[in-house]
Image (tube, rainbow, N blue to C red):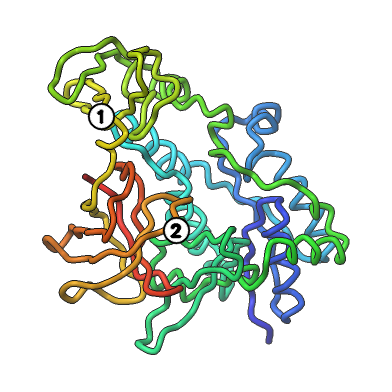
């Protein structure tokens, strides 16, 4: 009997080709799109678009019909609200810069979808992510960078657990993006030339502050810009408008370029400083998840990325306590941002990662 796999279909070319490849490999493939929007009206879902809007459902359904596979829409609104939207809002209100895609991957696309898929008798779930699942000589499962470095998505998947990885297939990680589009084209998939989704799906206009006001029903408190010494240099619109390293859109003119170097939620202050003040060699992170090893043993040499599009740099890792790791880079890094992920690599494999706290 063939193994059964549930493919999370976003209506995009990558997940569509993932479904095709797995069917070609002999799996019994079931397509699922996760309905996450809180609003009921189709017009609102259509406007939101992104990876899970109404158009995504229609595109995924057309692909499933083309491939001749079963297809369902599953409601994950509650999980998305609790684990992604509420987290996103709370992080910004506490002066941190969240990564909602990582939370969505961990708690919605994997934890919730995997649980439901296993309940209906599936052996695996699969996605169109550019990453590869590998089993190491020590018996542990880890993510390996995708064949196409420019599209590699392992950074956003570092928090997956051993059990989740054990039940995960990522077939497009073995291909270049151009090859994936060519496969879609040759197979006659209707999404072969659909552009990739770029923005945070639930804030397509990038106006995070207004979204947070609508979500909480509370007006964001204004505050002061201050310098490193604490001198007030002007008013700001509220801390949810800013992130570490930001220069544009500050709404203040000091006659020279200045950058956000710190956000102080307890006082509502946003610290402005010079570009040089954004560089540091050391950061700390918690909420750790180790992948290729069960835990760190002493000091470990690795490479680390501090944001999705960071190229990564060499560093030393050491545990400060049971829940906190210190990362010391060989070279200063710019704008390590509390709330963002730091992800560690040994060669092409994900060693683990965590959330930057300072």
How far apart marks 2 and 1 lie (CA) works out to 25 Å
**Residue 319 seen in render:** yes
The one of 169 and 182 positioned closer to us in this rendering: 182
**Percent x, y of residue 204:** 58, 31
Pointer 2 or 1: first along the chain = 2
Q: Which mark is residue 263?
A: 1
Q: Residue at x 72, y 80 (%)?
A: 25
138 is higher (above) or lower (below) than 257: below
Q: Which structural element holds mark 2?
A: helix
| Residue labelled with disc 2 | 155
Answer few, some or many: residues within 10 Å of disc 1's Cα (few below 14, many 20 plus, some between 14 and 19).
many
Q: Quadrant of the C terminus?
A: top left
Q: Which mark is residue 57?
A: none
**Percent x, y of residue 256:** 35, 19
Q: Residue at x 46, y 55 (%)?
A: 156
**Residue 121 seen in render:** no
Is the Cβ of the residue at disc 2 closer than 8 Å to that at disc 1?
no
**Percent x, y of residue 18:** 68, 66
Q: Is residue 91 left or right of residue 59?
A: left
Residue sitting at the far top? 234
């Amino acid at each position: 009997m063939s193994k059964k796999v549930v493919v999370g279909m976003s209506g995009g070319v990558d997940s569509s080709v993932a479904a095709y490849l797995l069917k070609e490999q002999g799996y019994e493939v079931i397509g699922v799109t996760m309905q996450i929007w809180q609003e009921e009206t189709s017009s609102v879902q259509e406007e939101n678009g992104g990876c899970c809007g109404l158009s995504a459902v229609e595109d995924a359904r057309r692909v499933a019909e083309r491939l001749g596979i079963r297809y369902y829409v599953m409601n994950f609104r509650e999980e998305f609200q609790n684990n992604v939207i509420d987290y996103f809002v709370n992080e910004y209100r506490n002066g941190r810069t969240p990564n909602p895609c990582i939370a969505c991957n961990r708690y919605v696309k994997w934890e919730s979808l995997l649980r439901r898929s296993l309940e209906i008798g599936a052996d695996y779930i699969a996605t169109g992510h550019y990453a590869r699942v590998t089993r190491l000589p020590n018996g542990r499962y880890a993510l390996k960078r995708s064949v196409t470095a420019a599209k590699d998505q392992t950074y956003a998947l570092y928090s997956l657990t051993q059990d989740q990885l054990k039940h995960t297939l990522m077939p497009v990680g073995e291909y270049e993006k151009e090859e994936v589009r060519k496969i879609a084209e040759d197979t006659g998939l209707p999404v072969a030339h659909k552009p990739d989704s770029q923005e945070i799906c639930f804030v397509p206009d990038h106006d995070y502050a207004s979204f947070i006001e609508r979500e909480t029903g509370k007006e964001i408190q204004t505050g002061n810009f201050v310098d490193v010494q604490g001198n007030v240099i002007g008013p700001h619109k509220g801390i949810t408008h800013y992130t570490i390293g930001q220069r544009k859109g500050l709404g203040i003119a000091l006659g020279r370029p200045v950058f956000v170097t710190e956000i102080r939620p307890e006082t509502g202050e946003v610290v402005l400083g010079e570009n040089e003040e954004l560089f540091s060699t050391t950061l700390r992170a918690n909420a750790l998840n180790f992948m290729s090893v069960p835990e760190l043993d002493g000091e470990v040499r690795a490479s680390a990325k501090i944001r999705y599009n960071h190229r990564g740099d060499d560093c030393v890792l050491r545990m400060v306590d049971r829940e906190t790791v210190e990362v010391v880079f060989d070279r200063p890094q710019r704008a390590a941002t509390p709330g963002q992920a730091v992800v560690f690599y040994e060669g092409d494999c994900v060693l683990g990662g965590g959330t930057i706290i300072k």
